[in-house]
Amino acid sequence: MPELQRLRADHAQAILAFELANRAYFATFISDRGDDYFDRFTDRHDALLTEQDAGAGAYYVLVAEDGEVLGRFNLIFTGNATAEVGYRVAQHVAGRGVATATVRELCRLAATRHGLRTLRAATAHRNVASQRVLTKAGFVPVGPADPDHLGGKPGSWYQRDLATDRAGTVTT
Ligand SMILES: CC(C)(COP(=O)(O)OP(=O)(O)OC[C@H]1O[C@@H](n2cnc3c(N)ncnc32)[C@H](O)[C@@H]1OP(=O)(O)O)[C@@H](O)C(=O)NCCC(=O)NCCS
């Protein structure tokens, strides 16, 4: 079973392989990261770990049993028990519910491990797959997103309010 793991230094090579293998695929949904990201990947990975250690966010990778990275799922803390969600999933496992199941798991972790009460995600109108993922994971559209947030494309903010019962189960 793939495992959702907190970002570590030793994930670097598998994440770079994932980003390279899926670069063209991701660019059909969202803005490309640009050559500089790949040229300076190690610096960027180190910076993410530093941000995570400083409490700016919680960054997760979905790792297969053989160590291959199948997806990335990030929480960027924005204050007031709220985080912005971001995610990407490998092309070769697309359409199997991997993103949906893992965003649901991320919602559970957000509430139980990180004490968050609200998750938000901005997605472009043309990114129908991402809208489906968010809707299936319990998010609802709450208003327009600034195109600057979406590589110049029009889109919407989606939001999910989190609540847990005493057993730590996310109930809404
Ligand atoms: C969006 C993304 C995470 C989806 O990952 P996934 O594991 O394939 O998603 P799931 O299988 O859980 O669900 C995908 C849903 O989108 C639908 N879908 C996929 N491609 C689609 C398309 N081009 N048009 C319409 N619907 C599409 C699927 O049918 C499915 O919906 P369904 O269950 O109602 O049939 C993946 O495509 C990705 O990484 N894209 C690039 C990064 C990105 O867009 N991130 C989100 C930024 S807001």
Image: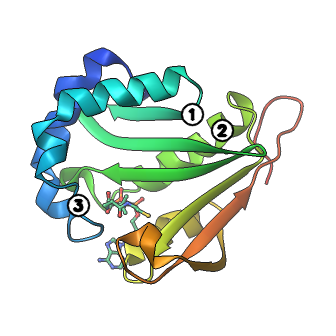
Location of the C terminus by quadrant is bottom right
**Residue 64 in sight:** no
> What amino acid type should be assigned to the residue bearing mark 2?
Ala
The residue mark sitting in front, 1 or 3, is: 1
Residue identifier under label 2: 110
Say which amino acid is labelled 3: Phe
Name the secondary structure under disc 2. Answer: helix
Q: Report the side of 150 relative to 52 (left or right).
A: left
Which residue is disc 3 drawn over?
A: 26
Q: Whole-Å distance between the Cαs marked 2 and 3?
A: 25 Å
Left or right relative to 61: residue 110:
right
How far apart marks 1 and 3 lie (CA) works out to: 25 Å
The quarter of the picture where residue 12 lies is top left
> In terms of sequence position, does the residue under pointer 2 or pointer 1 come before the other?
1
User: Ligand 1 within 8 A of label 2's CB?
Assistant: no
Identity of the residue drawn at 55% across and 23% down:
54
Q: Determine crowd level at label 1: few under 14, some 14-19, many 20+ residues with C-alpha closer than 10 A.
A: some
> Which quarter shows the N terminus?
top left
Give neighbour class at mark 2: few <14, some 14-19, many 20+ (Cα, 10 Å). Answer: many
Q: Is residue 158 above or below residue 2?
A: below
Label 3 crowding class (10 Å Cα cut-off): few <14, some 14-19, many 20+? Answer: some
Q: Is mark 3 within 8 Å of ligand 1?
A: yes
Q: Are marks 2 and 1 in contact (CB under 8 Å)?
A: no
Task: Say if residue 155 shows up in the picture.
Answer: yes
- 56, above or below 20, in the image: above
Question: Under tag 1, what secondary structure?
Answer: loop
Instruction: Name the disc covering residue 56, or none.
Output: 1
Identify the residue at horizontal 12%, vertical 61% (top origin): 24
What is the C-alpha distance between the residues marked 2 and 1? 14 Å
Q: Residue at x 58, y 52 (%)?
A: 84
